[in-house]
Amino acid sequence: MRGRSGASRISLILVLVAALLGGVSLSTGAEAAIAVKKPTPPHGLTGVGSASLSGVGTTDLKSWVSSRLQADVQRRAGKLTVSPAPLTAAAAAAPLAAPTGTSALVLYDTTGPYGYLGELYAMAVANLAGHFGTVTSKPVSAYTAGLVDQYTATVYIGSTYYGGSIPDAVPAVFYQDALRTTKPVSWVGDNIWNMANAVGIEAFKQKYGWDPTNSFFETGGSVGNITQVAYKNQTLTRKIPTGFDGGVLHPALSGAGYPQVTELATATDANSGATSPWAVRSGNLTYVGEIPFTYVSESDRVIAFEDLLFDGLAPATTERHRAFVRLEDISPKADPAQLRAMADYLYSQKIPYGINVIPVYKDPKGVYNGGRAETVTLAQAPKVVTELKYMLAHGAVLMNHGYTHQYNNVNNPYTGVTGDDFEFFRAHVDAADNVIYDGPPAEDSTLWAQSRVTSALGAFAAAGLPKPTLWTTPHYAASATDYRVLGQNYTARLERSLYFAGTLSGGAVNASRYIGQFFPYAVKDVYGTTVLPENIGNYEPEPFNNHPARLPADLIASAKANLAVRDGVASFFYHPYYAVDPLKQTVDGIRALGYTFVGPTELAQ
């Protein structure tokens, strides 16, 4: 990730003069690093836009929301006919052997015009459940009798609003099993009313104390403007643009004579001040009133869901709050003095940290070198290598941040220069100053990705540095193929990631449909790789690409929100070309919240 360098006026003038005079090469020994004002991607880059979905997914999201709300209006009016799922041979099949240890069953919808969204949301749940143990994910239509009893807990994501032309794909046996089992069941989003109808409304009320058939997303003809969710003494944000907000279900509590319903999280409407449950629990059933994986932020209501999973999968977990910082975009052109200043500060505070190193610097068009192409390897930058070794001797852990952190000799999307651009994904900036993700490069393949990894590791070895075992993808964007290659070469990735449609189903991966996600704890993701968290962003003193500045106070506020996760991490990154003081402010503020800084390898424990 590249941020702004905060160039001094003098250094910028020197660069301009050099350019006007034909340029002066500074690559000899790669020791003369000049601070220049360079492009920066948005601080919270997840490989997707603000919706956390690909461009296609974001467009479909709006239509999906509209169709759901129309169906909800019909249901309220008693005009929505729901055809039950047919009894198929699959529904009567014998269950497989139960998994050992902590295990999660994730069920998801696949039918309807936006059925693929179900797989995207299921991957988000499966990734989080991968923190706790093994995960089995399958379409809910493939559910067979007794499966819920074979797992520690089950999560169903209702993303297809069944009714009208879309028949119910949820087997009746799942409705019955969810009512019968004593195992924890979490229900997220739609179709809980179909369960009540299937098992009997009164039977549902007698066990759970509320009536889904009389619960709706709109009140007074509107979903309102819910902007906050209160959970465990933290106020979490909910920022969804008009037209993309499907609302939060308002559960109709049954009251006296029925089981008590526990309100786990509370939603607040910014316009009316009205509050309503965001998540409730009674008996073995936890219900979350929306699917919380779009329009997320570092202090978002998804944090509540991330913590609620502990109740079903690891209820005895001890409260623990750890923090992590990594220094970002260290290339052969880094300023050795700046690296030393960061190292000395962090060592004085007894803070272990990561150093994300790019082993080869490329400026193929001479953007920052007077029009002359420039390539510098770590082996050609002995002073930088000396500082890297100093850092490793003073609490740092070496991490691999791509091979060149740029792609070919084209703007992708900024300059083609190391640290500025994507390496494993194509992108451009549109007329509205938004970064648009175009997909994997044409030559993307297992062989291509492996060749870049092999070259990167060779550059570390040539400089006399140890082999890094941790990886961060440049600008957090790569293909499913690339992620699998990375998993074969590194023990873990420390990053935000993209997850593509087709991954769970085993079919062809659709590179135009994906969801971006970041985590508050280590997970084993659907690619089979351990992913360590980065979840509160980075210091960015100036707005860029329609993203606001992000100051120490913002990072600290996000860390505070993440205290809601009982065994969570506040993980951020910082560019060493900035002054030390903002880093000090951030560290002091996070420590004051009760976090303990740890090294990256400890995050997986």
Image (cartoon, rainbow, N blue to C red):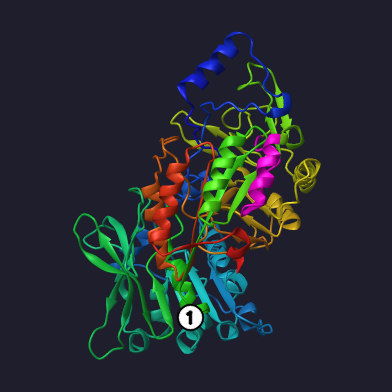
Quarter where residue 88 is shown: bottom right
Is disc 1 placed on a helix, strand or loop?
Answer: loop
In-image side of 274 versus 18 (left or right): left
The quadrant of the image that shows the N terminus is top right
Write down the residue under mark 1: 315
In-image side of 596 versus 378 (left or right): left
The quadrant of the image that shows the C terminus is bottom right
Give percent across and percent down for residue 165. Answer: 46, 63
Give percent across and percent down for residue 184. Answer: 48, 82
> Does the image show residue 65?
no
Residue at horizontal 62 percent and vertical 46 percent from the top: 356
Give percent across and percent down for residue 395. Answer: 61, 55
**Is residue 14 found inside the magenta-colored segment of the image?**
no
In-image side of 259 versus 44 (left or right): left
Q: Tag 1: residue type? A: Pro
Q: Nearer the viewer, residue 503 or 160?
A: 503
Q: Which residues are magenta?
A: 383-406
> Furthest-left residue in view?
272
| Vertical position of residue 584 compared to residue 143: above or below | above
| Vertical position of residue 100 compared to residue 398: above or below | below
| Vertical position of residue 28 compared to residue 202: above or below | above
Residue at horizontal 49 percent and vertical 33 percent from the top: 4
> Furthest-bottom residue in view?
257
Q: Nearer the viewer, residue 528 or 94?
A: 528
Residue at horizontal 54 percent and vertical 16 percent from the top: 14
Q: Nearer the viewer, residue 277 or 36?
A: 36
**Is residue 393 found inside the magenta-colored segment of the image?**
yes
> Does the image show residue 174?
yes
> Furthest-top residue in view?
21
